[in-house]
Image (cartoon, rainbow, N blue to C red):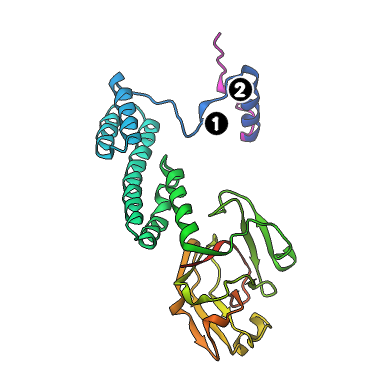
């Protein structure tokens, strides 16, 4: 049975009404459109049947890690693509092949003891491949490297009262805003909520190379400083930050959007009577009293 509905029957309705009525119709007929339930697997259309065969051969070569062959097959299949959706789908597999080839090289680099270098390259390039078929495997590699290379100061996975909405902070689990694991921290920055403090640090900081974290300021923010506090430093926070006497401080510029921050510990400037062995906590302090929203995830020390 074929149903044909003239668009004129909907012309008197506003767009939201059209959408709701259309979805109800699909539900009644039991035939949800593929682009609503499987956007990652569109119906592929080909000029000739050989296009589909070439595409499957490309996927087979990809699975076998024969990346040069996979690229050749995907490019040949792309020439047989009948529409834009099919070409875009193949382009995503071409991107995945590029990412898989790079990932394979990084894995080999890590095996010969260059784990830090492999991780640094991977962390920088991962966003390019994250939405392609190689994304999950690439992410798995980075997670394995993080377990070996980092001591996590806070990944915000454990929900507790250590951060409070009273001071502008709350745990979130929106996948679009989480960079590692299942949760991140939303921070509504203001003059009265301008500091974040992490109290759990390793006993001896001398063996660590750098501090890393993800900081997302979707609409921009303000300059900030990262502070490792040494006993004897003022605990009065940002309002009297100029009175801090004993601390390691790194001044950071404002940015817009997501950024992976990595600062070598040697770049933190010591102020007053300081030793890395005596550091007691870590703080992020936004300057200027500006109101904006930031998202923090995976604050860690790299070995």
Instruction: Say if 154 sits above or below 233 in the image.
Output: above
Task: Describe residue 67's horizontal placement relative to residue 179 as left or right.
Answer: left
Q: Residues within 10 Å of mark 2 (few under 14, many from 20)?
A: few
Find residue 59 and report its horizontal and vertical position in percent. 34, 31
Asked which secondary structure carries label 1, the reply is helix
The residue pinned by badge 1 equals 36
Residue at (40, 58) in percent of width and height: 119
Q: Is residue 241 magenta?
A: no
Give the left or right position of residue 52, taking residue 301 as reference. left
Outermost residue on the top side: it is: 1
Q: Is residue 81 visible?
A: no
Q: Nearer the viewer, residue 265 or 25?
A: 265
The reply to whether dot 2 and dot 1 touch (C-beta < 8 Å) is yes
| Residue underneath mark 2 | 26
Front residue of this view, candidates 31 and 62: 62
Residue shown at 42% from the left, 39% from the top: 133
Mark 1 neighbour density, 10 Å: few (under 14) some (14–19) many (20 or more):
few
Look at the numbered disc 2 and give the secondary structure of its residue.
helix
Judge whether 299 appears above or below 226 on screen. Answer: above
Quadrant in the picture for residue 285:
bottom right
Decide whether the magenta segment is chiefly helix, strand or loop: loop
The magenta-colored residue range is 1-15
Identified at 55% across, 30% down, the residue is 37
Name the one closer to the observer, 157 or 290: 157
In-front residue for pair 93/22: 93
User: Residue 272, image x and y in percent?
Assistant: 55, 91
The picture places residue 130, in percent across and down from the top left corner, at 44, 47
Label 2 vs 1, first from the N-terminus: 2
What is the distance, in whole Å, between disc 2 and disc 1 at their CAs? 11 Å
- Using the image, tell me which numbered label, if any, was put on residue 46: none
Camera sees residue 92:
yes
């Amino acid at each position: 049975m074929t149903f044909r509905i003239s668009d004129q029957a909907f012309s008197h309705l506003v767009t939201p009404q059209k959408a709701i009525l259309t979805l109800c119709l699909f539900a009644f007929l039991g035939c949800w459109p593929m682009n609503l339930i499987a956007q990652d697997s569109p119906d592929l259309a080909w000029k000739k049947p050989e296009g589909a065969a070439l595409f499957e051969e490309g996927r087979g070569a990809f699975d076998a890690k024969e990346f040069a062959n996979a690229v050749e097959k995907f490019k040949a299949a792309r020439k047989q693509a009948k529409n834009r959706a099919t070409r875009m789908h193949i382009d995503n597999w071409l991107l995945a092949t590029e990412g898989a080839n790079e990932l394979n090289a990084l894995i080999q680099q890590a095996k010969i003891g260059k784990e830090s270098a492999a991780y640094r390259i991977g962390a920088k390039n991962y966003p390019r491949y994250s939405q392609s078929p190689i994304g999950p495997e690439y992410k798995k590699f980075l997670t394995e490297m993080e377990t070996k290379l980092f001591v996590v100061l806070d990944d915000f996975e454990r929900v507790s009262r250590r951060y409070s909405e009273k001071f502008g902070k709350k745990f979130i689990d929106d996948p679009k805003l989480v960079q590692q694991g299942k949760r991140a921290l939303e921070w509504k920055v203001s003059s009265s909520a301008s500091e974040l403090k992490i109290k759990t640090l390793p006993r001896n900081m001398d063996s660590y190379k750098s501090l890393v974290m993800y900081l997302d300021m979707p609409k921009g923010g303000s300059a900030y400083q990262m502070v490792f506090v040494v006993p004897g430093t003022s605990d009065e926070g940002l309002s009297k930050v100029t009175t801090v006497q004993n601390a390691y401080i790194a001044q950071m510029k404002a940015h817009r959007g997501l950024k992976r921050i990595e600062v070598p510990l040697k770049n933190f400037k010591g102020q007053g009577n300081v030793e890395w062995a005596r550091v007691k906590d870590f703080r992020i302090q936004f300057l200027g009293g500006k109101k904006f929203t930031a998202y923090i995830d995976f604050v860690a020390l790299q070995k």
